Amino acid sequence: MNGIHDMGGMQDMGPIRRDENEPVFHAPSEGRSFALNLAAAAWQKWNIDASRHQIELIPPADYLRMSYYERWTERLIELLVRTGLVTREEIESGKPSPGSPKATPPLTADKVPAVLRSGGPASRNVSVNPRFKAGQRVRTRNIHPTGHTRLPRYARGKLGTIHLDHGVYVFPDSNAHFLGEKPQHVYSVRFAARELWGEQAAPRDSVYVDLWDDYLEPA
Amino acid sequence: MTAKVSDEHDHNHEHQTVPSDFALRVKALESLLVEKGLVDPAALDALIDTYEHKVGPHNGARIIARAWVDPAYKKRLLADATNAIAEFGYGGRQGEHMVVVENASKVHNLVVCTLCSCYPWSVLGLPPVWYKSAPYRSRAVIDPRGVLREFGLNLPQDVEVRVWDSTAELRYLVLPERPAGSDNLTEDELAALVTRDAMVGVAKVALPQLQGKA
């Protein structure tokens, strides 16, 4: 989706504002929003790709206006409603619907360390033939899917070189829409900065992008 | 004066302001989810405590210091970062698949996530606001040298800049150059010098007496 989230190469977004002694969370509400997102994900009603895509669906003007954890909160609400864990009426009233059953949370405090330690590996131990090998020249496909993709606009239709093969991973473009994991090789692909940005870029600089087999064609 | 304060407020919105309606919205959502039995409030406390107090750039700094003093470890780190980092007990969430890229006198690495905010939580903790902000995400790939100048780092033309856009589930950590004159420092003293910014690639590691000099 050619959304506002796909920011690489945009200009005039202003100076980078830094806070030398920035707290992890700027207010308790940011921490609660963060933790609610992680705890609700333990229901496994969605995956990380669907979760990222839900943020991309925030309308562009809202996306730019919102703070980071405002986006996370809106994302969580939409995922909860989409997957039926809560209803829109419950979000609006702030109360469980009369007669709705009380669930048992899958993530309890005692399980937090183990859950964080195991994480959610996206690699898959399946045998899939790689279409490319290190050193090979490739061209990224010039595609503009309306759904989720991790091929940034600035890197489409560009010539690059396979730097290395990371192995087999879940394919976000299908997984985000619950259409299967479609495991395939992910490569680190090196693009000369001048291939992406023209003569204004420094001659020896480069950008490395991690890309799936389905994004690439032989060059 | 009132107008000036108001301008500042708007300008810094993404930076630091947490609007009160946001706080109320989060509070309402939490109480609904707790009442429905969907989340355990004690689990929320544990998650927040983990990222406020346990996981952070001090983890990554230990990795870097070890790589500086132990060539065999550095070799393992560059060949298989996930397992080399796991030797310290770090891994899991948003550090499942790690890659370490090494700076040298003529190579400088910079990490970004242009599409969202991917960041190696297991070794750096949660990302700062600037890393997640539109100005950084948009410009790091098209004008990395300009971005680095904003961070006070002026790279000569003969230094090659490599930008790593975290588009997949690989998470990147920069191995900065060990500062000259640090030969007599212990591993712990070295770790104390390594900053989050250096491990993202927007700064170099400097000895305390050299900080602030050009």
Image: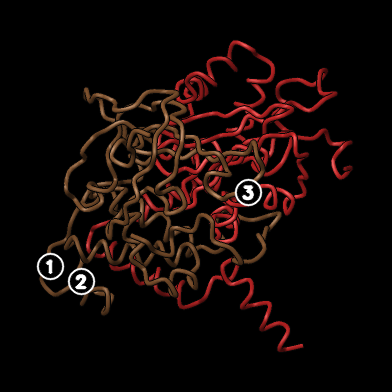
Q: CA distance from mark 2 to mark 3?
A: 59 Å
Q: Which chain is brown?
A: A
Residues at circles 2 and 3 in contact by the CB criterion of under 8 Å: no
What kind of element bears circle 3?
A: helix
Residue at 62% over, 36% down: B109
Residue that protrudes farthest toward the bottom in the picture: B2
Chain letter of disc 1 in the image: A
Q: CA distance from mark 2 to mark 1?
A: 7 Å
Kind of residue indicated by mark 3: Glu
Chain letter of disc 2 in the image: A
Kind of residue indicated by mark 2: Pro
- Residue A76, percent across and down? 32, 62
Within the image, what quadrant is residue B40 found in? bottom left
Quadrant for the C terminus of chain A in the image:
top left
Within the image, what quadrant is residue A144 found in? bottom left
Residue A135 in view, yes or no? yes
- Comparing B176 with A216, the one in front is A216
Whether A78 is drawn above or below B182: the answer is below
Within the image, what quadrant is residue A180 found in? top left
Q: CA distance from mark 1 to mark 3?
A: 62 Å
Q: Disc 1 or disc 3, which is closer to the eye? A: 3
Residue at 23% over, 25% down: A128
What number is the disc on residue A199? Answer: 3
Q: Disc 2 or disc 3, which is closer to the eye? A: 3
Question: If you read the primary sequence from the N terminus, does the residue marked by circle 1 or circle 3 appear first?
Answer: 1
Left or right: A70, with B188 as reference point: left
The residue carrying pointer 1 sits among few (fewer than 14), some (14 to 19) or many (20 or more) residues within 10 Å by Cα, namely: few
Residue position marked by numbered label 2 in the rendering:
A96
- Residue B164, percent across and down? 53, 40
Question: If you read the primary sequence from the N terminus, does the residue marked by circle 2 or circle 3 appear first?
Answer: 2
What number is the disc on residue A100? Answer: 1
Chain letter of disc 3 in the image: A
